[in-house]
């Protein structure tokens, strides 16, 4: 593919291509924002396995772990390579940029483009760990995918975003092809029992547990290993479509799995497992859920720059896991990094904004332009310092070290 101008073409929240230079610049900016510890104090670089490293909270976990704690190990994501007609996916370029940042700090990291759900990927990762790094000190599970093939049965399950029990109508944020914003009301039909079960299969804790067992079978869990799965609870305003819906049922399964793994790991190697409940953020997943985009836009309108970024939250998580500084833990042993979002005063103000918001006062109560810009940034656009009229080469290879 020849160098060319890459533009943010698409429909609504979905863009067809990603900008290589914008994605790389984003990674560099995030890397520079991490408060760095004194590397001379490191007795050794901890070994980490990051599952789902290329976007959102998984990318924040990878950058924070690399820049602040000097982790080494394996990062896995599944991204689309460039073709003659299209650029690679944004995660492809972000992973390449993370690899370059890691190399500059002398970090040994292997980057796999593979399906986290398959046994073949688990075998490949275990082989890499055994050959290059040794047992895992930290396992961060941040896998978000629309479907999963069950390795035992061969059946493919698809996740759905639906309420349970009854159809649900919610306000939502819409963008037309020209970027104009509007508040609409959409109805979402209730999920069937089969859809609920399939969503749990994809987004619940089953695959996380299989990863822990695969590592244990190969004696690749270090003494005192800590594993955490990233999750979200959210506001009562979005509960019918999220926490009380199919996604919430899967998240409940994830939390049950965390308790089971925590008990097992404590007896096996003095380790532990937990879920990390993160705050709201603009991601490719969240922007597709009815009502969530409007909620996040209202949250930004209420808090402005006081919204905690994924990177800020994941620095807190790493500090908690490493014992440098504690984070809140609730009575269900969930790490709560969403304390800023779910504060009573914040939620009270959001409820008022939610009740009053409509198209005519959207820009007054929310931050739709900010939200739209954040969506474009997911694809490497709207990044300061990038000349989007310049030609760029989309055909960049995956990081060499695998």
Image (cartoon, grey):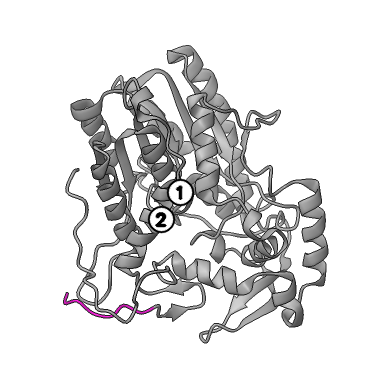
Question: Magenta span covers which residues?
Answer: 1-7
Q: Is residue 385 left or right of residue 351?
A: left
Tell me where residue 167 sits by quadrant.
Answer: bottom right
Q: Secondary structure at mark 1?
A: helix
Circle 1 is placed at which residue position?
33
Residue at (65% x, 30% y) in the render = 329
Q: Is the Cβ of the residue at disc 2 closer than 8 Å to that at disc 1?
A: yes
Quadrant (top left, top right, bottom left, bottom right) of the C terminus: top left
- In the displayed structure, 32 sits above or below 386; it is above
Instruction: Give the image location of residue 39, x and y in percent.
Output: 35, 29
Tell me where residue 179 sits by quadrant.
Answer: bottom right
Quadrant (top left, top right, bottom left, bottom right) of the N terminus: bottom left
Label 2: how many residues lie within 10 Å, few (<14), some (14-19) or many (20+)?
few
Residue 143 in view in this figure:
no
Q: Which mark is residue 339?
A: none
Front-lying residue, 350 or 216:
350
Residue at (68% x, 63% y) in the render = 295
- In the displayed structure, 386 sits above or below 244; it is below
- In the displayed structure, 333 sits above or below 20; it is above
Instruction: Give the image location of residue 181, x and y in percent.
Output: 62, 80
Q: Secondary structure at mark 2?
A: helix
Residue 2 within the magenta-colored segment of the rendering? yes
Circle 2 is placed at which residue position?
29
Front-lying residue, 224 or 259:
224
**Magenta part mainly helix, strand or loop?**
loop
Label 1: how many residues lie within 10 Å, few (<14), some (14-19) or many (20+)?
some
Residue 400 in view in this figure:
yes
């Amino acid at each position: 593919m020849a160098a060319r101008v890459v533009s943010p073409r698409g429909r609504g929240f979905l863009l067809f291509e990603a900008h290589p230079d914008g994605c790389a610049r984003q990674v560099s900016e995030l890397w520079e924002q991490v408060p760095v510890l004194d590397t001379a104090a490191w007795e050794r670089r901890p070994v980490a396995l990051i599952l789902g490293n290329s976007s959102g909270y998984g990318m924040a976990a990878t950058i924070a772990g690399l820049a602040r704690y000097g982790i080494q190990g394996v990062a896995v994501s599944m991204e689309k390579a460039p073709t003659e007609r299209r650029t690679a996916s944004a995660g492809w370029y972000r992973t390449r940029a993370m690899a370059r940042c890691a190399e500059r700090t002398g970090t040994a990291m292997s980057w796999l483009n593979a399906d986290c759900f398959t046994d073949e990927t688990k075998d490949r990762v275990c082989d890499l760990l055994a050959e290059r790094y040794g047992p895992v000190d930290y396992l961060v599970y941040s896998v978000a995918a629309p479907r999963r093939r069950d390795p035992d049965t061969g059946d493919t399950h698809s996740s759905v975003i639906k309420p349970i029990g009854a159809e649900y109508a919610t306000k939502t944020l819409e963008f037309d092809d020209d970027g104009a914003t509007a508040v609409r009301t959409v109805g979402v039909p209730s999920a069937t029992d089969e859809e609920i079960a399939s969503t749990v299969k994809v987004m619940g804790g089953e695959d996380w547990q299989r990863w822990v067992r695969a590592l244990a079978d190969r004696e690749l869990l270090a003494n005192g290993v800590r594993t955490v799965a990233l999750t979200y609870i959210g506001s009562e305003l979005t509960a019918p479509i999220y926490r009380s819906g199919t996604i919430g049922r899967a998240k409940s399964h994830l939390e049950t799995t965390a308790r089971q793994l925590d008990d097992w790991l404590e007896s096996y190697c003095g380790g532990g497992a937990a879920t990390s409940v993160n705050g709201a953020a603009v991601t490719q997943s969240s922007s597709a859920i009815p009502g969530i985009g409007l909620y996040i836009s209202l949250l930004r309108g209420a808090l402005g720059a006081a919204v905690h970024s994924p990177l800020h939250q994941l620095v807190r998580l790493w500090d908690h896991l490493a014992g440098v500084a504690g984070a809140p833990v609730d009575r269900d042993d969930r790490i709560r990094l969403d304390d800023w979002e779910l504060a009573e005063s914040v939620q009270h103000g959001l409820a008022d904004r939610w009740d009053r918001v409509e198209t005519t006062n959207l820009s007054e109560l929310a931050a739709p332009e900010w939200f739209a810009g954040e969506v474009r940034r997911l694809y490497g656009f709207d990044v300061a310092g990038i000349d989007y009229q310049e030609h760029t080469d989309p055909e960049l290879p995956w990081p060499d070290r695998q």
